[in-house]
Amino acid sequence: MTNTSKIPCTVAILTRNSANTLRKTLGSLERFEEMIICDGGSTDDTLAIAQEHGARIIIQDRQFLDADGRINDFSRVRNQTLEAASYDWYFYIDADEEATSNLVEEIAKIVDGGSPAAYWIPRQYVFQGKHIKCATTYPNKQMRLFNKKVTNEFIKAVHERIEVISSTSIYETKGVILVPIDSDIESLRY
């Protein structure tokens, strides 16, 4: 697989008024064959940005949302995207995160030659454009890439994760997901 060919893998992103960050997120995912946006009623430019990037848009099922339209069961909403995915390989990322080019290239190699497996992906914080090299939560790994044959579903309403079939091979990527930390420190005050 050349470094410009599309990766036969579905990427899923949950959104709700994510216009401020989504363009950068989707820009980091251009090599993926399928991008699914599962939206919870955005009123900003989120859906227009998703369409500009060729993402397929599905709507979050209202039964998994609270009265204010916020997700109350993340596993069920993630399962919506899992069911909608066209490819066996599935990668999910948040609307304010970014896949590094190293991670994208690594995923391309995994998908091209790998048997069904699941992968832990380390996440690294970014503050005001600078990578945070050390944090108490590092390596902050999450199982974000897997072949659908190794799971039946996402579980847990909050801090959702996949339930891995017992004989599954599990690995860790070298590439990371970048997680921006809110640069407006004043907004974090109590």
Image (tube, grey):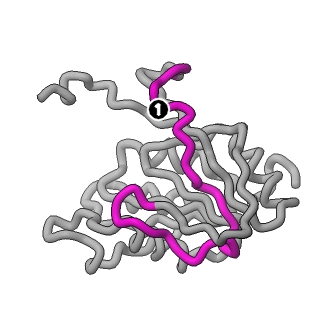
Which residue is under mark 1?
137
Question: Relative to 155, does residue 49 appear above or below in the rendering?
Answer: above
Is residue 144 within the magenta segment? yes
Q: Residue at x 61, y 72 (%)?
A: 151
Q: Is residue 41 visible?
A: no
Residue at disc 1, secondary structure: loop
Q: Position of residue 175 (x, y in %)?
A: 68, 38
The magenta segment: 132-160
Image quadrant containing the N terminus: bottom right
Q: Quadrant of residue 133?
A: top right
Residue sitting farthest toward the front: 166
Is residue 158 within the magenta segment? yes
Q: Quadrant of residue 102?
A: top right
Of the pair 31 and 158, the residue shown nearer to us: 158
Q: Residue at x 21, y 67 (%)?
A: 69
Q: Residue at x 35, y 51 (%)?
A: 18
Question: Relative to 176, does residue 75 appear above or below in the rendering?
Answer: below
Q: Position of residue 155 (x, y in %)?
A: 45, 69
Three-letter amino acid code at the position of disc 1: Thr
Question: Relative to 53, does residue 167 appear above or below in the rendering?
Answer: below
Q: Position of residue 189 (x, y in %)?
A: 16, 26
Q: Is residue 181 visible?
A: yes
Is 88 left, or right, of 49 in this rendering? Answer: right
Q: Position of residue 101 (x, y in %)?
A: 69, 38
